[in-house]
Image: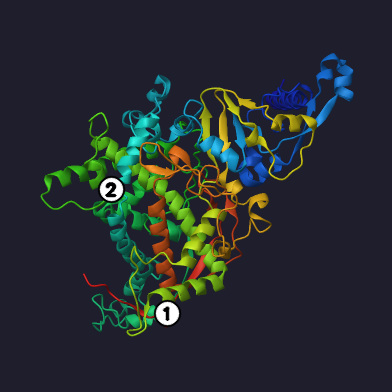
Amino acid sequence: MSALTLAVNALVAAVGAFALIVAANVLYQLLAPRDPTKPPLVFHYVPVIGCAVSYGMDPMAFLDDCKRRLTWRLLDSASSASPLDLVMCPPREPLLYGPVFTYPLLGRKITATLGPMGSNFVLNGKLAHVNAEEAYTHLTTPFVPPLSLLLLLPADEGLHLCRVFGTEVVYDVPNHVLMEQKKFVKFGLTTDNFRRYVGLIRGEVNDYVSKHVFDNDFFHLHPRFCSASSSSGEGTGACKRGCADLSIALQAKATSSVDAFTTSSEITIFTASATLQGREVRAAMNKSFADLYHDLDGGFTPLVRSRLLSHLLPETSIDTAREQNFVFPNLPLPSYRRRDRAQAKMREFYISILEKRRASTDEPDLDMLTALQNQEYKSGEPLTDKQIAHIMIALLMAGQHTSAATGAWAILRLGENQDLQRRLYDEQLEYHLDKETNTLRELTYENFQTPLLMAFIKELLRVHPPLHSLMRKIILDCPVPAAVGAPSAEPAASPSFKKRNEGVEYVIPKGEFVLAAPGYSQIDESIWGKDAKGFRTERWLEEGNKVPGEEDEGEEDYGWGKISKGGKSAYLPFGAGRHRCIGEQFAQVQLGTIIATLVRELTWTLDQPFPGNDYTTMIVMPASPRNVTFTRREGKPAVAVAEA
């Protein structure tokens, strides 16, 4: 028998086996009696893979489709029916999935609980039932490889498989320790620090616009504009590099087309490093640090082609495909090994800063490193340098992705809506223009929160939340209250559905996962009305502009200060419960200052139709192409320099 024949036979056998597996899976779902204590299982063809393709393409559309689906439930009389009757005419009744259902995803069973009640069930769930650390431990916990894999790896690579954030922090510690660490971070997020941060952010944005958006350095060196590089070789002394007429260069470069996400990513990392991270980190934002960030970022962002810091990494960043996925964090890929080496080097970088500061007699800066250096656990044990370094890495990575995505959406929304962009600029004039001197007052912590700007940010976070869904792992069989599964608008489909809503609970088994989707609730038409998916800033300026159905649920202290429970709200861009984002106030300061500064300096338009969502990453980003053309704002008043 020839090799070709063997290959064909093997292929036919494989296809046949696959078809049998699919057929058996389909028949099982159609004919097997359904456990009434478990949520409906979303129909799928291929075991293990499950709904990965449909969910991955558009999670929100997938969840909405499942919620409105009808399935079939075998009646009790099915137990006495003949096999032929079960196949030809099974005794069954229709059953609406509703807001609670289970879908298989890459070997995991995930139960979605949609709506505000579902979000509250997951995000304010009891620690005895749901656990975030188990769901997200792949971001922190070291991977201990088998001996066979260690033998295949270089010695220095097999010993540093420590993922992205690092050990002893965030999800690599018990929940009560994480709560203490969040309290430590909160000490660095004081009002006094925010007052200083506004000025730093404003300066970074202006510097970025000058150096990177319009690339002034290009004109200093380009032969067309720099007489020092011209054929005559004679400079005029107009600038230190010999530019004949810098003003001509700047006029020629009055517009610039840029990628919105790249621009937002760079502004975000520069402003975050100048404020939270400290001056040493900001000063290190050169190619070497950008290389480390790029490699570490590869372990955090799945299936994404990154252009982050492309102006610093022109040869590697632009066309480097990210093949890793957070579902498979332990694959022996070169990109994973680069991730682990980068994590170790970045840790040593932060530790070296701490050591230099201790040896210095200078007054310490008011930044996060200083705040963390002086903290200790309730047990009296101080934070170690390693833990401080890993917390700083967690702040850099987690905050960078969410803020960069939100900033990109802000740029794109204002590029799409020229009227809103103009109104935001007019608001800056209304609140900050000194008519006597015709100058704009500098933005400060006390004055940056103008009404239209804050309404725009609220609507931005409603329509474009960085994280549309949040997961927890079930560590103890968890009952789902009937109120969580109650349909929001659809009529009950069967008597059994009505009965369950009267008090019969589902039970999610231990070892499975549960998912809250605040992003779904934020665009649910049954809550927000027919324009729920539309972007309408005015909804937050209208009378009674509260979140529909929102109630005061009181406050609770989870170990890092009192916060609103707020889990039943239809607006949760920063999450809820013990794992609520601690950087909410900083995000408002950062994003508000960035947008206000850009609006003061520039106008911009979209280069293409408004982009859709890119769901191939952990953070929802705008899909490519996502370019805007920036133009220097003409006739703008100067900004008054505040007295020291």
Give whichever of 558, 375 is nearer the camera.
558
Indicate left or right for 354 with 45 as reference.
left
Image point (78%, 24%), residue name = 27
Residue 394 marker: none
Query: SS for tag 2?
Result: helix
Circle 2 sits on which residue? 368
In terms of image quadrants, where is residue 164?
top left
Check disc 1 and report its element: helix, strand or loop: helix
Query: In this view, which residue lies farthest toward the left?
Result: 361
Q: Position of residue 219 (x, y in %)?
A: 35, 74
**Count of marks placed on residues:** 2
Circles 1, 2 touching at the beta carbon (< 8 Å)? no
Q: Is residue 261 visible?
A: no
Residue occupying the point 44% across, 65% down: 595
Whole-percent x and y of residue 269? 37, 54
Q: How crowded is mark 1: few (under 14 residues within 10 Å), some or many (20 or more)?
A: few
> Residue 84's quadrant in the figure?
top right
Q: Read off the residue under disc 1.
A: 252
- Quadrant including the C terminus: bottom left
Image height check: is 255 above or below 66?
below
Q: With 628 as the anchor, is 533 left or right in this view?
A: right
Q: Disc 1 and disc 2: Cα gap in Å?
A: 42 Å
Judged by depth in the image, the label closer to the viewer, 1 or 2, is 2
Residue 43 showing in the rendered view: yes
Q: Specify the amino acid type for callout 2.
A: Met
Tell me which label, 1 or 2, sits earlier in the chain: 1
Could you say where residue 432 lies in the image, as x and y percent from the top left?
Answer: 38, 74
Q: Nearer the viewer, residue 581 or 125?
A: 125
Quadrant into which the N terminus falls? top right
Q: Which of 314 and 113 is in front in this view?
A: 113
